[in-house]
Image: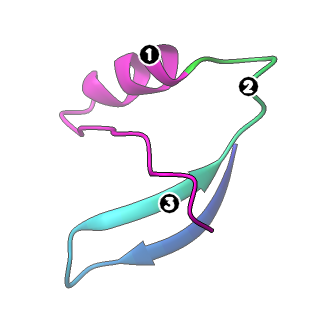
């Protein structure tokens, strides 16, 4: 996993990850342990 962008003003962060190693659900679950929420971004980039 690599952090792509962090916006403290929007309270958002974008990360890049290898989908062969982790799913969106796994990433969200891992972040939930630290009381963060994860949502997939639309593939518009």
Q: Which mark is residue 14?
A: 3
State the extent of the magenta-drawn residues as a range: 24-45
Task: Return the x and y of residue 28 as percentages of the image width and height.
Answer: 38, 25
Residue 10: image quadrant is bottom left
Residue 36: image quadrant is top left
User: What residue does disc 2 label?
Assistant: 19
Give the answer, above or below, for where 1 lies relative to 23: below
- Marks 1 and 3, how far apart at CA: 15 Å
Residue sitting at 18 percent across and 33 percent down? 35
Task: Return the x and y of residue 2 as percentages of the image width and height.
Answer: 70, 53
Q: Which mark is residue 25?
A: 1
Please indicate whether residue 37 sits to the left or right of residue 18 in the image. left
Q: Secondary structure at mark 2?
A: loop
Residue 27 included in the magenta stretch of the image: yes
Q: Quadrant of the C terminus?
A: bottom right
Q: Quadrant of the N terminus?
A: top right
Q: Secondary structure at mark 1?
A: helix
- Marks 1 and 2, how far apart at CA: 11 Å
Mark toward the start of the polypeptide (3 vs 2): 3
């Amino acid at each position: 996993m690599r952090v792509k962008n962090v916006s403290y003003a929007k309270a958002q962060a974008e990360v890049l990850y290898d989908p062969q190693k982790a799913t969106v659900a796994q990433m969200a679950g891992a972040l939930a342990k630290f009381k963060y929420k994860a949502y997939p971004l639309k593939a518009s980039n």
